Image (cartoon, rainbow, N blue to C red):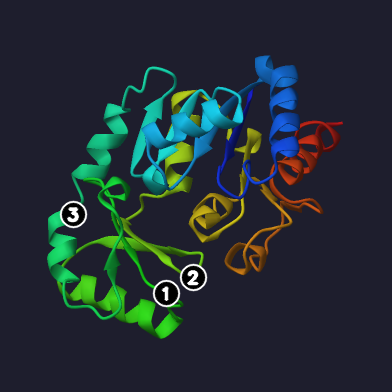
Amino acid sequence: MERSLVVSDVDGTLLGDEGGTRRFGEFIALHRASLKLVYASGRFFDSLIKSIHEHQLPAPDAMICGVGSEIRDYPSGEIDGQWQQHVLQVFCADDVRKALRSFPGLVDQPQECQSPGKVSYFLHNAGATQLDALRDTLKFKGIHSDIVYSSGRDLDVMPQGVNKGSAAIHLAKRWEISHNNIVVCGDSGNDLPMFQLGVHGVIVANAQAELADYHRPGLFRATKPCADGVLEGLNYWLTEAVN
């Protein structure tokens, strides 16, 4: 039987309820031989390692870090060089910073949130008009980029076409896992590109409106929050739906 690929956000999805996190780990242990597990986060490798140890998350096969700007194998931490080359050949973080230097309301996120493939700001309660103006500013400066806005606060400027979703597809191709065997799980706006892939999706009950309001066929809307919601969805997509 072909393996499945489970790609899940971490904060607010797998973390948030210790009992649910433990039950998720037990589920993964039972099904480990038949799946690849990937954590997809806005955080970077060292920070995610701390969460794995502190919350006893099951060991993943890889991590999508920095909202998709970096892929690392686990536990080695080796960077996926092919993906990194793709990211950096179309993006210059310094050009983004210069272009947005005078844009109103932007506050730099801490240095540990930045990378050569991602520029991150705080921008509180931004509306569609403000986000469109930001996109227009980048376009006017000749910068080919996408913006990811989540939690009514976190703004990431990314290389065009680089996100959690495209990184997940890169790993699926690398491991020769078909589109029909991918399950993505999340709770916020920076997870949306994963759900837009058209693969099986799990939206946890505590999802923010930016994701909860997204509709298309193939989504499982959990009745439980955090990891217990992920388990609801995995039980559906990996067991019930294939019977």
**Residue flagged by tag 3: what amino acid is it?**
Ala
Kindly identify which residue carries mark 3.
93
User: Badge 3, how many Cα within 10 Å: few under 14, some, many 20+?
Assistant: some
In the picture, the disc for residue 124 is 1
Which image quarter holds the N terminus?
Answer: top right
Res. 1 in view: no
Give the x, y percent position of residue 84. Answer: 27, 36
Which image quarter holds the C terminus?
Answer: top right
Q: Do the residues labelled 2 and 1 touch (CB within 8 Å)?
A: yes
**Real-space Cα distance between discs 2 and 1?**
6 Å
**Residue flagged by tag 1: what amino acid is it?**
His
From the image, state whether disc 3 or disc 2 is nearer to you.
Answer: 2
Tell which circle, 1 or 3, labels the residue nearer the N-terminal end: 3
Could you say whether the residue bearing mark 1 is in a helix, strand or loop?
Answer: loop
| Identity of the residue furthest to the front in this view | 54
Give the x, y percent position of residue 234. Answer: 74, 37
Tell which circle, 2 or 1, labels the residue nearer the N-terminal end: 1
**Residue flagged by tag 2: what amino acid is it?**
Gly
**Real-space Cα distance between discs 1 and 3?**
22 Å
Quick one: 141 or 188, which is closer to the camera?
188
Tell which circle, 3 or 2, labels the residue nearer the N-terminal end: 3
Q: Which residue does the image show at 49% across and 70% down from the upper left?
A: 152
Could you say whether the residue bearing mark 2 is in a helix, strand or loop?
Answer: loop
Judge from the rendering whether residue 76 lies leftward or rightward of residue 225; answer left or right: left
Give the x, y percent position of residue 93. Answer: 18, 54
Q: Which residue does the image show at 71% across and 42% down from the upper left?
A: 230
In the picture, the disc for residue 33 is none
Q: Which residue does the image show at 43% across and 45% down from the upper left?
A: 166
Kindly identify which residue carries mark 2.
152
Res. 51 in view: yes
**Real-space Cα distance between discs 3 and 2?**
23 Å
Judge from the rendering whether residue 212 lies leftward or rightward of residue 102; answer left or right: right
